Amino acid sequence: MMKVGLVTLWKRNYGSALQCYATKSAVEKLGYRCVPLFRTFPGVLRYTYYVGELFRVAANSARYKNYLTNYVSLRAAGKKSICSLSAKSESSLDQFVQTVLQPEGYSYIRLKEIGKSEEFAAFIAGSDQIWNGARRYDPVSFLEFVPNKKKIALAPSFGTEIEIYNKKPFARAIKKFQYLSAREQDGAEKINDLTGRKAVRLSDPTALLSPNEWRDFSNSAKSAKGDYIFLHFLDTPCDDALIAIDELRNETGFSLVAFAYPHEEYNRVEGIRFYDGGVQEYVKYIDHARYVMTDSFHTTLFSIYFDTPFFTFHRQYMHNASQTSRITNLLSLYGLEERLVADINTFRHIWNSKMEDCSVTREKEREKLTGYIKKSLANT
């Protein structure tokens, strides 16, 4: 059986793990073995890498304004985000990665050997923010260890604006891809601006599975009892979100269920029940909720898949690189722009409004995504 290498994100984030799962499932339905890959630093390589990293940070800090500030804030935000997960939820995510996704880690030298191996028909980069424009350029994320003819970009997201220090290495690497796509329309435009090449706009790979397939996936998970409002905030919920949570509970009489991230700010709202869980629970809680309140891209997306009324609040990022465009691109695609809550008055205006039917768009997006994967794998 021929293999397909997959370089993407999955670590300790529900949406990242599920988009990786969906890609792996879709590729394997086509008769390949899909292998998520990541880079390791065995032995002395760990130390030489860190020394090199220090020199790169020093050189870029001298050359580019605000480079060091951005670098430090992004690293700190990443660590804090992982630490914000409850220990039990973190363990559940790790178990899913180890038992289901089964990523394989290799040194960069070994990855280059794998890239040339005839066992691998192709390599996929993406999805999720694998090409984040504010983070330091990573050659593995751009499949630099792979021959150009085998490179496929599957809906990678830039997440934010591409910082000046990343434009040249990003452009040089992206030009080499055999097939190019981006998760957001402005991502496709960024690729065109950088390289002069056109990239197709594709949905997040979670769209590869139908709502009923996601229900089958989560069927064995436990669900919260009764009518509830599902709360899933990756970062600290803003004041408007906390006020809206309390008001929606009072208007509906539904209970409040917070998931995975036990923010201290939840103590400002009475009656919130906290639940841990893995990816199956995450999917099922969204499906069975009467309402969803979130700052998460993927929680918004799964709410759309299940026709669960939702309200997405501006995320209080712990770094300076705003990623709100991901949400606005997504909501625009489905005609749900009003579900992005700008302030408490906006929420009060829309809380009982009916959501648009998204079923036709969902199916078109799934067909487009599936067709891209089939075509790109057949021609690499």
Image (cartoon, grey):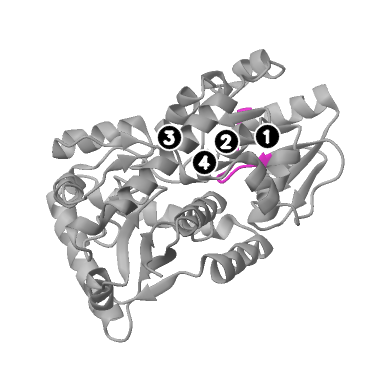
Structural distance between the alpha carbons of marks 1 and 4: 19 Å
Q: Earlier in the sequence, mark 2 or mark 3?
A: 2
Question: The magenta stretch spans which residues?
Answer: 231-240
Q: Earlier in the sequence, mark 4 or mark 3?
A: 4
Name the residue rendered at 33%, 42% in the picture: 158
Label 2 secondary element: helix
Q: On the image, numbered disc 1 is attached to which residue? A: 292
Residue 207 is tagged as 4
Structural distance between the alpha carbons of marks 2 and 3: 11 Å
Q: On the image, numbered disc 2 is attached to which residue? A: 300
Give the x, y percent position of residue 105.
39, 74
Structural distance between the alpha carbons of marks 1 and 2: 8 Å
Name the residue rendered at 84%, 35% in the picture: 227
Structural distance between the alpha carbons of marks 4 and 2: 13 Å
Residue 26 visible in the shown view: yes
The kind of residue on which mark 3 rests is Arg
Label 4 secondary element: helix
The kind of residue on which mark 2 rests is Thr
Q: Is residue 238 covered in magenta?
A: yes
Task: Indicate left or right for 247 with 302 as reference.
Answer: right
Task: Indicate left or right for 128 with 353 as reference.
Answer: left
Q: Earlier in the sequence, mark 1 or mark 3?
A: 1
